[in-house]
Image (cartoon, rainbow, N blue to C red):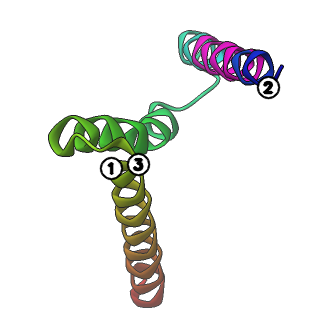
Amino acid sequence: MINILILISLGMVGLLVLLMLGFGIRGLTNRRTSTLAMVSTLAPIALLIVLGLIIGDWALAGIYAVAITLAATILAMVLSGFRGLFN
């Protein structure tokens, strides 16, 4: 029973990911989403895939991807604050 529920939930997650990709592509083709917003959304996913292929351990690659993304976000916020301070 548990195995069936796990498969159903994984299938739903897969379907939702496909829907998100589809609506993202639709938003780009209709010019309702900026390219920068889409690239900044896809960057952590690409980082996870690259790290997963290099390291081989996907759980560790996920942890590294989250840590790198968090550090990049903090750095971007600090640089944005400095830019606003000097303008």
Kindly state the secondary structure of the residue where label 2 is placed: helix
Mark sitting on residue 59 = 3
Q: Is residue 1 above or below residue 37?
A: above
User: Residue 43 — which label?
Assistant: none
**Which one is earlier in the sequence, the residue at label 2 or at label 3?**
2
User: What's the CA distance linking mark 2 and mark 1?
Assistant: 27 Å
Is 41 located above or below residue 19 in the figure? below
| Three-letter code, disc 3 | Ala
For residue 11: magenta? yes
Prevailing SS of the magenta stretch: helix
Q: Residue at x 47, y 74 (%)?
A: 77
Image coords of residue 13 (percent x, y): 68, 23
Q: Which residue is mark 1?
A: 61
Residue type indicated by callout 2: Ile
In front: 28, or 43? 43
User: Which of the 4 image quarters holds residue 66?
Assistant: bottom left
